[in-house]
Amino acid sequence: MNQSGANTLVDMTILIGYLPAPEGEAALRAGFAEAKLRSSNAVVINSQRRGASGTPTEIDQDVIDRIVSLGKDSDVEVEVLQPDHEDDLPGTLNELVEEHDAQLIVIGLRKRSAIGKFILGSQAQRILLEAEVPVLTAKA
């Protein structure tokens, strides 16, 4: 371990999808617990739809600092990224999996009605079906 308490020799990376909402917090908790268990680092992804900056899902530096601190409290080295994406969030995550050689994606889920899923579609469902690595889901 280095002076910050985070692991310095890490063989695995875990991607954690984060939005500033209860399901995002659930993903952080589950992702950091999994990273600690696996002696892995974590890459937290807060991805905005291209051209939609300033949305309620975008996080500022204070939130980034809090996320890094939470990771440090869990003895997990954390990097926070804010890549833009088009309509293909699962594709963006798969690109990040390859770029960071990640072995796991962690996302939070919120409860939705069957009609809500049918009408609005489900990014979470697409991530589960299209991810190139295992996906761990956490309920808020």
Image (cartoon, helix red, strand yellow):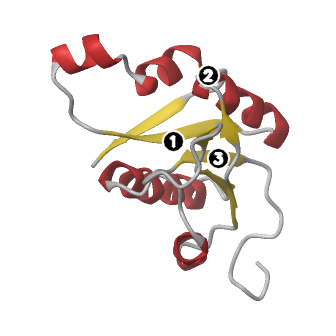
| Location of residue 87 with respect to 46 vertically, above or below | above
Upstream in sequence: badge 3 or badge 2: 3
Residue 14 has which mark?
A: 3
28 and 114: which is toward the camera: 114
Upstream in sequence: badge 1 or badge 2: 2
Which residue corresponds to the image point at 60% horizontal and 44% vertical from the top-left? 47
Which residue corresponds to the image point at 64% horizontal and 39% vertical from the top-left? 51
Residue 7 position, x and y percent, is: 74, 70
Residue 1 position, x and y percent, is: 76, 78
Which residue corresponds to the image point at 84% horizontal and 38% vertical from the top-left? 99
134 and 53: which is toward the camera: 53
Q: Could you tell me which secondary element the residue under label 2 belongs to?
A: loop
Residue 26 position, x and y percent, is: 36, 53
133 and 22: which is toward the camera: 22
Q: Residue furthest top?
A: 118
CA neighbours of label 1 inside 10 A, class few (<14), some (14 to 19), many (20+):
many
CA neighbours of label 2 inside 10 A, class few (<14), some (14 to 19), many (20+):
few
CA neighbours of label 3 inside 10 A, class few (<14), some (14 to 19), many (20+):
many
Q: Could you tell me which secondary element the residue under label 1 belongs to?
A: strand
Q: CA distance from mark 1 to mark 2?
A: 17 Å
Does the residue at mark 3 contact the one at mark 1 (Cβ under 8 Å)? yes
Residue 88 has which mark?
A: 2
Q: Amino acid at mark 1?
A: Val
Q: Amino acid at mark 2?
A: Asp
| Location of residue 11 with respect to 133 vertically, above or below | below
- In which quadrant of the rendered view does residue 6 lie? bottom right
According to the image, label 1 marks what residue? 106
Q: CA distance from mark 3 to mark 2?
A: 20 Å
Q: Amino acid at mark 3?
A: Ile
